[in-house]
Image (cartoon, grey):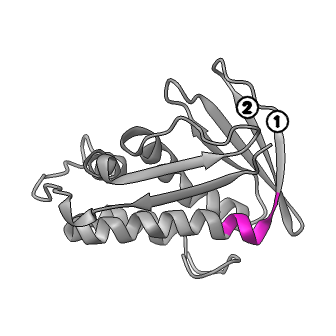
Amino acid sequence: MSAFQVTLHWTELSRVDIQTDRFYDPAVDDVRSILSDACQALNDYGRFHISGFGDASWPLDVATDLCVFVEQLPAAVAAIRQGKVAEIDLYEQGVERRLEITPVDDHCTIECTSSGSWVPDSETERLERDALIGMLTTLLSDFMQALAVVAPALAAHPWILAWCKQRVNFNQARPTDDP
């Protein structure tokens, strides 16, 4: 049985070419548009990995699955820090798994449900809360660092900055009164 783990690894980021001159129209776009463009461009240069619930390597890619995961990550981390239940839904065809993370004292219970053909060996895993928060914020920080390298203009876009600031302080393990 493999323990729950989430990682992101990059190679050859200097070769990524992201067009940063695209106009994002607030009438039809939001932060997900930027995340999608970034993940599409980064697809061939990264490996997004999740293991757990009896599966050593979930069938994930950077272009779609990382985009879906990372978009939900700031809100999930904020909820976990506040002791609230967090959900991350990897709804794309071929993955179709939902994680429900319930903080309890100094640990979190993670329940995985599948809406596809895959069936978890065990539907529940348990991790130390600080370790889980560290794992998730490391992934988000690694994503943001890669974005800053390959597309500084996108990393500095007001939507990306607001998305990060309102939800996650990368350097803090517990909630504060700051927005």
Q: Does 36 appear above or below 77?
A: above
At numbered mark 2, what does the secondary structure look like: helix, strand or loop? strand
The span picked out in magenta is: 127-133
Residue 15 or residue 132, whichever sits in front: 15
Q: Does 154 appear above or below 30?
A: below
Q: Amino acid at mark 1?
A: Glu
Q: Amino acid at mark 2?
A: Thr
Q: Earlier in the sequence, mark 1 or mark 2?
A: 2
Question: What's the magenta bit mostly, secondary-structure-wise?
Answer: helix
Q: Position of residue 19 (x, y in %)?
A: 13, 55
Extreme-left residue of the structure: 21
Quadrant location of the C terminus? bottom right
What residue sits right under mark 1 in the picture? Answer: 123
What residue sits right under mark 2 in the picture? Answer: 113
Quadrant location of the N terminus? top right
Residue 137, quarter of picture: bottom right
